[in-house]
Amino acid sequence: MKQRVHLNSVHSSGHGNPDDWIAVWFDGAHFPTFNITNAALRKYSDIHIDGIYFSKSFGGHKSSWATLHNAYTLYKNFEVQVN
């Protein structure tokens, strides 16, 4: 999975402009599998993306949801760019 988020600009009046976009690619696709455009994710210019929050869970809250054996997942190429 590859995801890119472009945070919208904010007009001097304080209203978020609908010029942001989110694109998600799965399985090495050449074109986004999921794409959102022309939305406003923020209203104020002092809201920034400056990190990544990542969480992986197997599901429920009881021990019956636990794996029977050790399980591993591998992740790579995390990147945050600020222009």
Image (cartoon, rainbow, N blue to C red):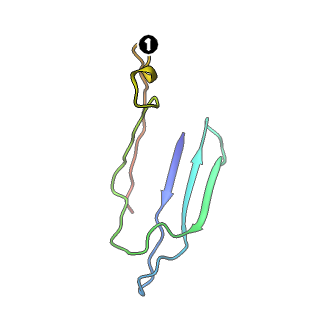
> Does residue 70 sit above or below 48 in this rendering?
above
Q: Which residue is mark 1?
A: 68
Instruction: Indicate the quadrant where residue 77 lies.
Output: top left
Q: Nearer the viewer, residue 65 or 38?
A: 65
Which corner quadrant holds the N terminus?
top right
Say what amino acid the circle numbered 1 marks: Leu
Q: Is residue 49 left or right of residue 23?
A: left
**Which quadrant of the figure has residue 49?**
bottom left
Q: Residue at x 52, y 48 (%)?
A: 3
Give the percent coordinates (x, y) of residue 2: 53, 43
Secondary structure under badge 1?
loop
Image spot of residue 47 (x, y percent): 35, 67
Is 28 situated above or below 64?
below
Q: Against 65, is 23 above or below?
A: below
Left or right: residue 3 versus residue 74 is right
In the figure, residue 71 lies in which quadrant?
Answer: top left
Nearest the eye: 42 or 58: 58
| Residue furthest bottom as drawn | 13
Q: Is residue 65 above or below residue 25?
A: above
Outermost residue to the top? 69
Q: Residue at x 43, y 25 (%)?
A: 73
Count of picture labels? 1
Q: Quadrant of the C terminus?
A: bottom left
> Which residue is located at x 51 percent, y 76 percent?
17
- Residue 12 x %, y %: 41, 86
Q: Position of residue 63 (x, y in %)?
A: 39, 22
| Residue drawn at point x = 43 percent, y = 74 percent | 43
* Mark 1, other Cα within 10 Å: few <14 / some 14–19 / many ≥20: few
